[in-house]
Amino acid sequence: MASQLKVDTITGVTTAGSIAVTGEGNSTTTNLQQGLAKAWLKWNGTGIIALGDSFNCTSLTDNGVGRGQIDWVSAMSSKQVATGCSASNDEASDNRDRTAAFTPISASRAYFTTYECASGSADDCEANGGIVNGDLA
């Protein structure tokens, strides 16, 4: 019979916010909190831009064609975070490559830009996503 653990809260014994998890190969450990995304979002960037789904994101602001900003509910400890972003259009007839970038400007806000790759120009894109890893304040 498989084991099952059901809990509402996990707290470290030595340090409440630090849980070590044994990694692959059983020879190293990974800090659980360091490996979790601290914020993520997906948004529609055409027409009236809007969050589709998110974690730790409070607002999305349209700053013009292909540009905007996202604010975090819980701030990061600094703007020195690792980010990843993606952009695409869902239309089958639109086969242009897209890319996106987050630019953290403070511990609680980042700008994003979505681009059409061939021209290098900012461009509104339908399906966008982003993730932030780092330390919460």
Image (tube, rainbow, N blue to C red):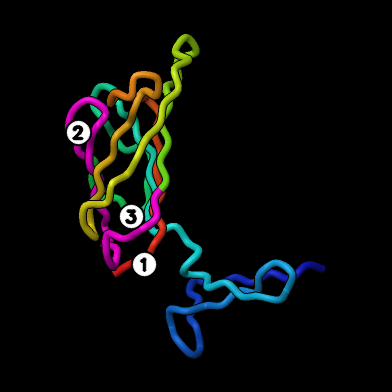
Judged by depth in the image, the label closer to the viewer, 1 or 3, is 1
**In the image, residue 67 above or below residue 94:** below
Residue bearing mark 1: 135
**In the image, residue 120 above or below residue 131:** above
- Expressed as whole percent of the image width and height from the top left, the position of residue 112 reads 28, 40
In the drawing, does residue 1 fall left or right of residue 132? right
Q: Which of 124 and 117 is in front in this view?
A: 117
Tell me the element at label 2: strand
Circles 2, 1 touching at the beta carbon (< 8 Å): no
- What residue sits 47% from the left and 69% below the top? 33
Circles 1, 3 touching at the beta carbon (< 8 Å): no
Instruction: Give the residue type that dot 1 points to.
Output: Asp
Instruction: Give the residue type that dot 3 points to.
Output: Asn
- Expressed as whole percent of the image width and height from the top left, the position of residue 119 reads 34, 19
Judged by depth in the image, the label closer to the viewer, 3 or 2, is 2
**Residue stretch rendered in magenta on the structure:** 61-83
- What residue sits 23% from the left and 45% below the top? 59
In the drawing, does residue 28 fall left or right of residue 97? right
In the drawing, does residue 105 fall left or right of residue 35? left
Residue bearing mark 2: 62
